[in-house]
C-alpha cells in the first residue's frame, strides 16, 4: 500500500514537473485569460447594470468573482478533451502500459491532475489576482468557506481529468477520437458555465447542465469559492462533485477493462 501510494505521488510530481517546462506557454495563457476576462467584464457588467444592478442573484461583485475565478481555472480544468493517453491508445503503445504494475486509468488521471495543479501557479492565481486588483470581486472570507473552496477546486480538477479520460478510452473502439474531442470541447465549456453562469440559463437548459458532470468542473467550485453557496448549499455542491467523480471513475474502469479485453482478443 505504501509503495503504491509513493508511486502515484511520484506520478503526480512528474505531471507537475512536466507542466513546469512550459513556462512561456503559461505566460501566454495568463495574457489570454486576462484579455478574455476583461472582455467578459465589459459584457457581463453591462448586462447586470442593464438589469438594474442584480440578475438572478448576481450583482457586480459576484459576477466579477465568477468571471475571474472561472478564468483562473481555465488552464487547469480540461475542457478541450485532449489527453496523452488518447495518443497511446491510437498508436498501440497502451499495451506497454497494461504490462506495468499500475492501473492505467489511475496513472493517467494522476499525471493529468499534476499538470493541472501546476497551471494554477503561473496562470490561475495571477488571473484572479489581476481581476481582484483591477475591478474587485466578492469572495468568501470565512475560513471554513476557504477550506470548502479549496476542496471543491481540487475535486473539480480530478473530476475533469476523470471525465476526459472517458473520451480517450473511447479510442479502444473508435481509434480516432478527434471528432469526439471537438464535440466534448463544445459541450463541456458551455455546460460547465465557462461563458455565462448556468444560473442565467433558461430553466430547461440549467436542468440539462445539472444532470451532467460539467458544472462540477467549474461552476460549483466558483460558487463555493466566491461565497455564493455557503454552509449546507456548499456541502451539497461538494457532495455532487464526489458523486460525479465516483460515477466517472466507475465508467472509466469498466471501459478500460473492456478495452483491454478487446486488445487481447485482437492480439494487441
Image: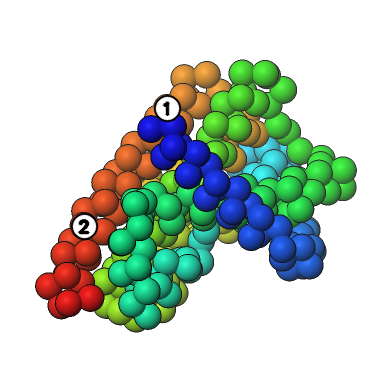
Callouts 1 and 2 close, C-beta under 8 Å: no
Query: Residue 107 at x, y = what percent?
Result: 42, 52
Q: CA distance from mark 1 to mark 2?
A: 32 Å
Determine the residue located farthest toward the right in the rendered image: 133
Pick the residue in front: 158 or 235. Answer: 158
Q: What crowding class fits label 2: few (fewer than 14 Cα within 10 Å), some (14-19), or many (20 or more)?
A: some
Query: Residue 87 at x, y = what percent?
Result: 42, 75
Q: Is residue 156 shown above or below 172?
A: above
Marking on residue 236: 1
Res 25 quadrant in image: bottom right
Q: Is residue 170 shown above or below 124?
A: below
Q: Is residue 234 shown above or below 247?
A: above
Residue at figure coordinates x 78%, y 67% from the top left: 24
- Residue pointed to by mark 2: 257
- Residue 135 visible? The answer is no
Residue at disc 1, secondary structure: helix
225 sits to left or right of 113: right
Q: Is residue 132 shown above or below 22?
A: above
- The coloring applied to the image is rainbow
Residue at figure coordinates x 48%, y 44% from the top left: 7
Residue at figure coordinates x 76%, y 53% from the top left: 122
Query: Residue 102 at x, y = what percent?
Result: 36, 51
Which image quarter holds the C terminus?
bottom left
- Residue 136 visible? The answer is yes
> Mark 1 or 2, which is nearer the eye?
2
Pick the residue in front: 109 or 191. Answer: 109
122 sits to left or right of 114: right
Pick the residue in front: 53 or 210. Answer: 210
206 sits to left or right of 251: right
Query: Residue 245 at x, y = what percent?
Result: 37, 42
Q: What crowding class fits label 1: few (fewer than 14 Cα within 10 Å), some (14-19), or many (20 or more)?
A: some
Amino acid at each position: 500500500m505504501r509503495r503504491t501510494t509513493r508511486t502515484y505521488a511520484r506520478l503526480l510530481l512528474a505531471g507537475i514537473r512536466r507542466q513546469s517546462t512550459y513556462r512561456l506557454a503559461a505566460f501566454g495563457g495568463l495574457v489570454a485569460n486576462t484579455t478574455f476576462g476583461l472582455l467578459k467584464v465589459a459584457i457581463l457588467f453591462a448586462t447586470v447594470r442593464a438589469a438594474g444592478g442584480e440578475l438572478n442573484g448576481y450583482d457586480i461583485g459576484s459576477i466579477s468573482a465568477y468571471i475571474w475565478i472561472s478564468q483562473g481555472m481555465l488552464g487547469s480544468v480540461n475542457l478541450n478533451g485532449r489527453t496523452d493517453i488518447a495518443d497511446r491508445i491510437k498508436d498501440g503503445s497502451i499495451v506497454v502500459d497494461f504490462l506495468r504494475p499500475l492501473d492505467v486509468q489511475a496513472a493517467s488521471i494522476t499525471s493529468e491532475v499534476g499538470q493541472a495543479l501546476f497551471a494554477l501557479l503561473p496562470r490561475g492565481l495571477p488571473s484572479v489576482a489581476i481581476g481582484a486588483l483591477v475591478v474587485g470581486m466578492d469572495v468568501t472570507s470565512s475560513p471554513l468557506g476557504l477550506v470548502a473552496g479549496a476542496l471543491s477546486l481540487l475535486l473539480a480538477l480530478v473530476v475533469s481529468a476523470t471525465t476526459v479520460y472517458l473520451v480517450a478510452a473511447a479510442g479502444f473502439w473508435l481509434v480516432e477520437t478527434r471528432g469526439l474531442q471537438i464535440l466534448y470541447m463544445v459541450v463541456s465549456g458551455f455546460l460547465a458555465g465557462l461563458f455565462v453562469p448556468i444560473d442565467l440559463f433558461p430553466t430547461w437548459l440549467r436542468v440539462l447542465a445539472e444532470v451532467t458532470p460539467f458544472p462540477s468542473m467549474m461552476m460549483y467550485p466558483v460558487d463555493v469559492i466566491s461565497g455564493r453557496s455557503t454552509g449546507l448549499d456548499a456541502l451539497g455542491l461538494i457532495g455532487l462533485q464526489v458523486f460525479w467523480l465516483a460515477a466517472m471513475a466507475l465508467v472509466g474502469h469498466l471501459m478500460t477493462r473492456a478495452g483491454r479485453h478487446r486488445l487481447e482478443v485482437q492480439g494487441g
